[in-house]
Image: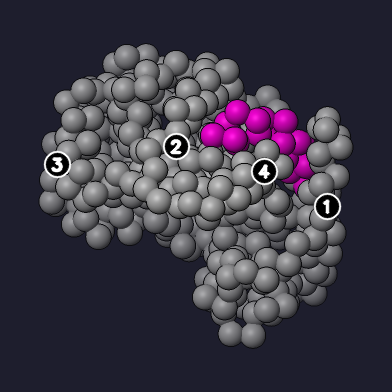
Amino acid sequence: MNTNELKHCFDEEIDRRLVPALKTHPIVLGKNGEDLFAAGVADMDFKAPAPVLTAMQQRLEHGVFGYEALPDGLMPALMAWLRNRHGWDVDEEKILRAPNVLNSLAISASLFAGEGDGVIVQPPVFFDFYDVVKENKRALVSNPLILNAGHYEIDFDGLERIASEPQNKMLFLCNPHNPVGRVWTREELIRLGNICQRSGVFVIADEIHGDITFPDNKYTPFASLGPEYADNSVTLISPAKSFNIAGCCSAFTIISNPDKRKLFQAENSRLTVNKNNAFASVAMEAAYKHGEPWLDAVIEYLSDNLNLVRTKLVDAPNVNLIEPEGTFLVWLDFRKMNLSVDELTAFLRGRAGWAVTRGRAFGEEGKGFARLNIACVKARLEPALNQLVSAARSL
């Protein structure tokens, strides 16, 4: 199939409620929320690529699911993907397996920062960053992004100041950034990396959304900037978002520094984070080898959905789109409505019929915002946007 033919596949409506999908589960939708527009949890409503489904079906038909070694083709497929898609050459010895990205984030916090040490985050940012820092008894240090004329920027002066404080040992980098949709430029990453190197701040780069960028925006892996940046960082990646296989895949931790990699390997061993899942392995290998046309088609479909959002919001008073450069998550600004956090949630659920992630979950800087997932069929997105427009007008 070519890209245009693949795009038509994403118009198929699939009832997520037929399985215990988190996005449509009462845990997320709440009481009496089954009829809401479910656009909160960060996964897609699209079937995984056909080659992934075929590979998993073939593995299922084998019928034996004992302990397995890592498939010979998985690491070469990942390395080829990083090289061909992103221009990043990674040696296999630097790649460790992980159950998921958050697991590696937590291990990094516990290994490379001491109890009470500061971990810098850049809010509004992925809410699990806060939990990882707090649950590992590290100190949360905020370097809020600057919203300048509808465009988020890193506060480099603020970062320089707090990075120079000796108790601050680590920075959690979200690249591309969830929820604001920034795809950090090479120049921005170099500036951030230089500040961290000068101050002895170790960078943990969550790059799970790296494969999904809109035209004219290029994802740059932080560790690809050069050996000195790779040596002062850990990179966390997974095909979970790229190919919509979050429920059946694992992740990878890329560590160039041999001493830190040895520590991480020892901690993986201590925690027995060293088992392979048969379905995860074949799904990831098939995705990296054969999933690129599907991903390109998804990005085109998401671009069309984003255009639909732009068009509809023109008629929604006091609702502004923060233009995303990547991810399938859209950050919406409702601050002109002058609603409290609870009032905005009530407005979105009760008046617009939306179940999205409220901005306050991403930090104090998220008050007055909400995160919308646009990785859904247009037949659901368009009426949901119409409902929002109508609700905003009535308010």
Q: Seen in the image, is 311 located left or right of residue 261?
A: right
Q: Earlier in the sequence, mark 4 or mark 1?
A: 1
**CA separation in Å, label 2 and label 3:** 28 Å
Which residue in the protein does label 3 denote? Answer: 167
Q: Nearer the viewer, mark 3 or mark 4?
A: 4
Task: For mark 2, give the secondary structure.
Answer: strand
Q: Position of residue 202 (x, y in %)?
A: 25, 32
Which residue in the protein does label 2 denote? Answer: 237
Looking at the rendered structure, the number of numbered marks drawn on it comes to 4
Q: Amino acid at mark 2?
A: Ile
Q: Nearer the viewer, residue 39 or 99?
A: 99
Question: What label sits on residue 11 in the rendered view?
Answer: 1
Q: Earlier in the sequence, mark 3 or mark 4?
A: 4
Q: Position of residue 319 (x, y in %)?
A: 70, 58
What's the magenta region? 285-305
**CA separation in Å, label 4 and label 2:** 24 Å
**CA separation in Å, label 3 and label 4:** 50 Å
Which residue in the protein does label 4 denote? Answer: 54
Q: Nearer the viewer, residue 329 or 363?
A: 329
**CA separation in Å, label 4 and label 1:** 21 Å
